[in-house]
């Protein structure tokens, strides 16, 4: 009798402790050790938010969904080269916009987020299984990768022509929110691996801004491309934290709070080492920017602050049980809070003396931070984590055809002088005698031109 009572007491104490830790966990804890972000690095985020929001506008001079305050003041209506609709893209991807920002010398391709009343968006999310698509030494979301290929097949010529018109030094920027963030991130990886299709654009002139990012790539890829992909997360946003595959999340959208609670309960008893050992597990991509605006046991929103890092462990692994878990996913809130945070960062920088860390030194520190993250991933034995020496040798190298497996495709592409983004994906890996996928890392690069 006494033994059973003792076990009950231990069980009750354990449950109370678990409930206390989970219910008192806030999103700010995920980045409490991260350094603050610099105003210059975070400055494009509000403008990128407005470009994505402009996808829904038929006429920017008479907007229907303009953000409060200045509206689309930073967007030049004359810079919109192409705006697609649902009729244009069909069921292949969400609508997107091609925009030339002449003030900042950028060509921007932005993809809108998930439309909850559109079945085609759900089809893109559902088109995936854990470990279905291997790419560049890691795993990616299959449906999002196909959507990224679809957009690049249609817009590569347009983007290349616009880059030529803007001249050297023009940056190519991909952006997206929610569903679109995953597509934008995977487009960035495709372009980085095939820069010859864009007149050998330098890697540092390619950038991606993933707002409320979806988990779309394995950990080794998330760290590898942290120098070109920037993810922005607002406080308690559920999507970057939920390891459950996207097809299950949005398939259960009408009982989302229950799903989040069950995921939270499951992950409590899952060790971090097991998470690292699973190469198929997907993560939010790139460098993380976390906007923090609420504190523990305090009501209301506080002046937001932005923290940044390239984390390997603790990459938003804990689901937050909060009443703002879903509202923090909204693009309108991200745009509003990023403007406030940027104004505060500029005020703080103006109130102080000139920075001790100059621009070149800051760039060097970013590169060192990226190298440290790659080393950390290798130390933790993250599957397929790349060596720093290998990364330096392969930066800017376009993957080549594998061998006999794709000899027919290669010969056809050679004769035509052109190939497609689908073939680029195939050329990033081949199969061994057992039919298993093997990454092509030691192949000689050949020029790949997009059809």
Image: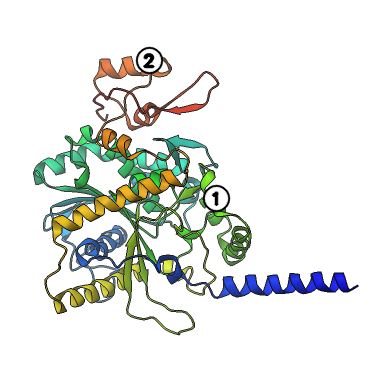
Label 1 vs 2, first from the N-terminus: 1
In the rendered view, does 28 fall on the left or right side of 51?
A: right
Secondary structure beneath label 1: helix
Residue behind mark 2: 407
Q: Eyeballing the image, is 342 above or below 387?
A: below
Q: What SS does tag 2 mark? A: helix
What percent of the width, then of the height, locates residue 421? 33, 32
Q: Nearer the viewer, residue 221 or 390?
A: 390
The 10 Å Cα crowd at callout 1, few under 14, some 14 to 19, many 20 or more, is: few
Q: Position of residue 248 (x, y in %)?
A: 57, 52
Residue 77 appears in the picture as rendered: yes
Residue located 48% across and 72% down the image: 26
Q: Position of residue 313 (x, y in %)?
A: 45, 55
Label 1 and label 2: CA atoms lie apart by 40 Å
Residue 75, above or below 436: below
Residue carrying label 1: 273
Give the side of residue 36 with respect to residue 127, left or right: left
Residue at position x 37%, y 46% in the image: 375
């Amino acid at each position: 009798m006494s033994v059973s009572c003792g076990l009950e007491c231990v069980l009750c104490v354990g449950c109370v402790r678990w409930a206390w830790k989970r219910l008192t966990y806030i999103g700010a804890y995920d980045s409490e050790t991260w350094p603050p972000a610099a105003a210059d690095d975070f400055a494009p985020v509000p403008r990128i938010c407005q470009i994505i929001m402009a996808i829904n506008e038929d006429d920017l001079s008479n907007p229907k969904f303009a953000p409060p305050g200045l509206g689309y003041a930073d967007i030049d209506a004359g810079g919109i080269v192409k705006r697609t609709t649902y009729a244009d893209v069909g069921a292949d991807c969400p609508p997107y916009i091609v925009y030339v920002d002449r003030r900042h010398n950028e060509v921007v391709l932005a993809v809108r987020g998930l439309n909850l009343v559109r079945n085609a968006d759900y089809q893109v999310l559902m088109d995936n299984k854990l470990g279905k698509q291997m790419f560049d030494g890691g795993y990616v979301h299959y449906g999002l990768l196909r959507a990224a290929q679809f957009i690049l097949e249609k817009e590569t010529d347009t983007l290349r022509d616009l880059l030529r018109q803007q001249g050297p030094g023009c940056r190519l920027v991909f952006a997206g929110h929610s569903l679109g963030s995953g597509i934008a991130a995977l487009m960035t990886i495709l372009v980085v691996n095939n820069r010859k299709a864009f007149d050998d654009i330098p890697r540092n002139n390619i950038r991606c801004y993933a707002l409320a990012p979806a988990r779309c790539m394995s950990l080794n890829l998330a760290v590898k491309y942290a120098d070109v992909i920037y993810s922005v997360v607002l406080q308690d946003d559920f999507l970057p934290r939920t390891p459950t595959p996207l097809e299950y999340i949005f398939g259960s959208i009408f009982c989302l709070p229950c799903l989040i609670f069950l995921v939270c309960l499951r992950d409590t008893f899952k060790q971090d080492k097991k998470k690292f050992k699973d190469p198929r597990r997907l993560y939010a991509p790139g460098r993380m920017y976390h906007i923090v605006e609420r504190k523990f046991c305090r009501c209301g929103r506080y002046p937001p602050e932005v923290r940044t890092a390239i984390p390997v462990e603790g990459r938003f692994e804990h689901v937050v049980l909060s009443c703002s878990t879903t509202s923090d996913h909204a693009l309108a809130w991200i745009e509003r809070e990023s403007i406030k945070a940027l104004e505060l960062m500029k005020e703080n920088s103006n109130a102080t003396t000139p920075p001790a860390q100059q621009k070149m030194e800051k760039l060097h520190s970013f590169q060192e931070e990226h190298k440290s993250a790659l080393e950390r991933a290798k130390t933790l034995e993250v599957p397929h984590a790349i060596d720093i020496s290998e990364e330096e040798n392969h930066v800017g190298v376009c993957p080549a055809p594998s061998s006999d497996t794709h000899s027919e495709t290669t010969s056809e592409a050679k004769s035509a002088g052109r190939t497609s983004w689908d073939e680029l994906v195939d050329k990033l890996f081949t199969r061994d005698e057992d039919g298993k996928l093997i990454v092509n890392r030691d192949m000689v690069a050949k020029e790949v031109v997009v059809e």
